[in-house]
Amino acid sequence: MLYNQDLLEELNVLSRYNLTSLQEGIKIHHDAAPEVVAAARRLFEKGLVDHQDGGYLTHLGVEVAEKVQSVLTILCTEEK
C-alpha cells in the first residue's frame, strides 16, 4: 500500500499534536483548508481523535501519533 493524499493529510494532522502534554488537543476550525477538515473527520471516524474537529487523541491515537512523529524525526534528520 502506498501513501495517497488523504493519508498524507491525516499524518500531517497527527504530527501537529504535542505528545509531551496529552492534556493539549488541537482545534481544526471550520474555515481551515477543506482537506485538513476532512482529514480530522476521518481520524475521528477511525477512532484516533475524540472530536471531528480534532480535539484530543484517543489511546490508539497517541500510539499512532508517536509513530508518525518518530518517523518524521528520523526522515527529517540530516546525516552529519
Image: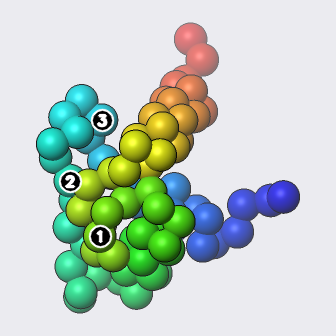
Q: Quadrant of the C terminus?
A: top right
Instruction: Give yes or no for contact between labels 1 and 2 (Cβ–Cβ under 8 Å).
Output: yes
| Residue shown at 23% from the left, 39% from the top | 22
Please tell me the numbered disc located at residue 19: 3
Amino acid type, mark 2: Gly
| Residue shown at 24% from the left, 62% from the top | 55
Residue 65 sits in quarter: top left
Find residue 5 and report its horizontal and vertical position in percent: 63, 72
Please tell me the numbered disc located at residue 51: 1
Amino acid type, mark 1: His
Could you tell which of marks 1 and 2 lies nearer the N-terminus? Answer: 2
Rendered position, 26 above or below 40: above
Callout 2: SS: loop
Query: Label 1 neighbourhood size at 10 Å, few (<14), some (14-19), many (20+)?
Result: some
Q: Which residue is mark 2?
A: 25
Could you tell which of marks 2 and 3 lies nearer the N-terminus? Answer: 3
| Residue shown at 42% from the left, 77% from the top | 41
Q: Is residue 12 visible?
A: no
* Outermost left residue: 23
